[in-house]
Amino acid sequence: MSLQIYFERPQVAEGSSDGKTTTTRDVCQRLDEGGYHCVIFWGSQSGTSERLAENLGRECGARFGINALVADLSDYDAESIANIQKKYFAIFIVSTYGEGDPSDNTAGLWDWIKRVGENKIRLESLRYLAFGLGNSNYKYYNRVLDVVADALDAAGATALIPRQRADDANGGTEEDYQAWKDNVFALLTRMGFQEKAITYEPNIEVDLVASSHDSEEYSVTSVHHQRSVTNSAIVPLTIKHARELFKSSDRNCVHLEVDLGNTDIVYKTGDHVGVWPINPEEEVNRLLDVLGLQDRRQDRLTVIPKTHANKPKVPSPSTLETAFRNHLEICAPVARKAVLEIAQFAPSPGAKSRLLDIAQDRERYERFTASTHITFARLLKFVSPEDAWRSIPLAFVLENLLPLQPRYYSISSSSVISPRRIAITALVVNKTITTEDQSTATIHGLTSNYLLSASNLQSATNAPVPVYHRTIESVDLQGQTILAHVRKSKFKLPITSSTQLILISAGTGFAPFRAFLQERAKLHAIGKPIGKMLLFFGCRNQNDYIYQDELVKMQEQLGDKLEIVTAFSRMQGQPRTYVQDRVAERAGKVLEMLESGANMYICGKASMAREVDMKLEEAVMEKKGLAEVDVKAWADGLKKRGKWKADVWG
């Protein structure tokens, strides 16, 4: 199997190069030499800000004739931003993740922004726009945007329009970006740039020809992934063991163990594993059918970007089947903007009218997608049930489908106990929607159902598990593999085993704590001193109490070194109790442990972590009589010293 890496950004590996030739790290010099009108800086952790910046740059050129420099923040010295002249303007598209942290490639800007305030640097000549990506479930929602924009404003820079935020809490990033982009385009018109009508011009060259090599193998490994000091290469890992964790439920929670084998990949307790899913065969066939390309699924596909800025999504050469199955997000929802753009290729006036109707405004489209399972192929089929979309350019399809991304799971095994075997704990996600005719439809979570299928475990729901392509057809686990890579994490146990631990989790957020407890139990068994551990665990009811059998054994082994506090939110005959409620009840104990040097870890949904933060801050305020600003300083101090860590999502 071919393992390919397309590029590495300068910030990801010391001493490495991504092969790009940057003529200068002075952005002003680059603007002058390139004849640019503006620079669009992006700071991205997952790739979304980068994608939006590149799209904005292309649209500015196509619509207004604006030559925009789309710039990775790490490619330029942040100090040179201070010298940008008024004839230019800068656009910042930055993301916030974790505890209000900037992306890795924003580190230089982040440090410079601090110096701007400390050294009273003035930026009167800088004209800028700013857009932030974040999730309001997190406590420090869009903090990076606000810190950067506040510093620029204080230094005398001119914001051409107010800063705006994208909120991904309910999947609103694309719509929020479109609303901001409309404001940007209105600004450009006021600045005197003439907007022109545009027609679709592909940014890639696509060639699809009959293959003369039936047995030719094509890479199924992402060209989008970058190996770095944080991320390992993608490798096939063999499944060695799988079991169901829920006792009796209408849901599945899968425990999966994969073997690192002879790979050079290593992991440490607390790291993440990125699982690269494949798309179900039903969706692959649906897309080939609706495009009228079913008989060309094995044809040789070559995709060549027209410019360096257009990074490939699929390896070249490949096949349509491989591209749709292994490399593109064909199961993802479709952005409203894409629906409007698809309309120009509709096979009939009726299909075009239906597309324009459902995408006419945000509210109408949200109502439609709330009651209709929409993917790219399902949308085309919905508006044109009879006619295939033979006139839609294949380049347009490939450009509008996002590259398939990994889904990350906290590793639930200890590298001390199982150095060559990684355990994954995955809740299988299935969302039920009520359609307009009042029937129900199930939207299957892509990666969790992929893992359920690969594990050969029985589905707990009435809905069948999607069928995924397998390289080895077998009724057991023998030889089954998944593609995955390891991502380093800062969510680590303290070096000193006698340090006390406070572990707060809900659901599969317990995964890394299973590894923490296994490691501590091992040390205890060989006579090493270990600190007391206070575990909070929340779930719906006893049936969802994952790893309960293991915890019972650990409790017996560790005695008073381990205290387990449970919270059940759906126990019959009992009031709903959440993990944050239990933390509030024992806040005195938690604060006492923190004051004596304990490390606190929180893992689970961001909304749960935010509630826990609030409960603890309220307790500190009451116990110590501190003002809100002092409580924040207390919490921030613990986090900066590594005594309060969070590993949260969505």
Image: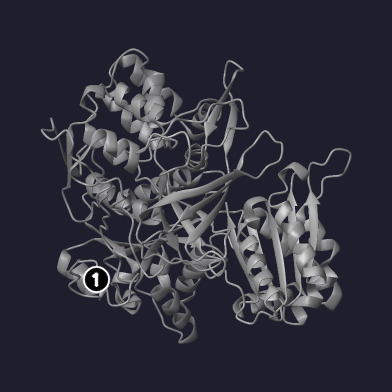
Q: Is residue 541 visible?
A: no
Label 1 neighbour load within 10 Å: few <14, some 14-19, many 20+:
some
The residue under the point 29% across, 73% down is: 76
Q: Is residue 541 above or below residue 5?
A: above
Nearer the observer, 110 or 560: 560
Locate residue 220: give its quadrant: top left
Give the side of residue 461 with respect to residue 208, left or right. right
Q: Is residue 107 visible?
A: yes
Nearer the observer, 417 or 605: 417
Give the amino acid at mark 1: Ser
The residue under the point 71% across, 40% down is: 247
Locate residue 600: give its quadrant: bottom right
Q: Is residue 352 above or below residue 24?
A: above
Find the residue positioned furthest to the top: 386
Q: Position of residue 631 (x, y in %)?
A: 73, 74
Q: Position of residue 41 (x, y in %)?
A: 34, 63
Find the residue positioned furthest to the bottom: 119
Give the side of residue 183 with respect to residue 368, left or right. left
Locate residue 437: give its quadrant: top right
Nearer the observer, 152 or 496: 496
Q: Position of residue 301 (x, y in %)?
A: 18, 37
Give the side of residue 103 with respect to residue 302, left or right. right
Q: Position of residue 271 (x, y in %)?
A: 51, 64
Mark 1: secondary structure: loop
Q: Is residue 9 above or below residue 595?
A: above
State how many labels appear: 1
Find the residue positioned furthest to the left: 212
The residue under the point 35% across, 52% down is: 51
Residue at numbered disc 1: 17
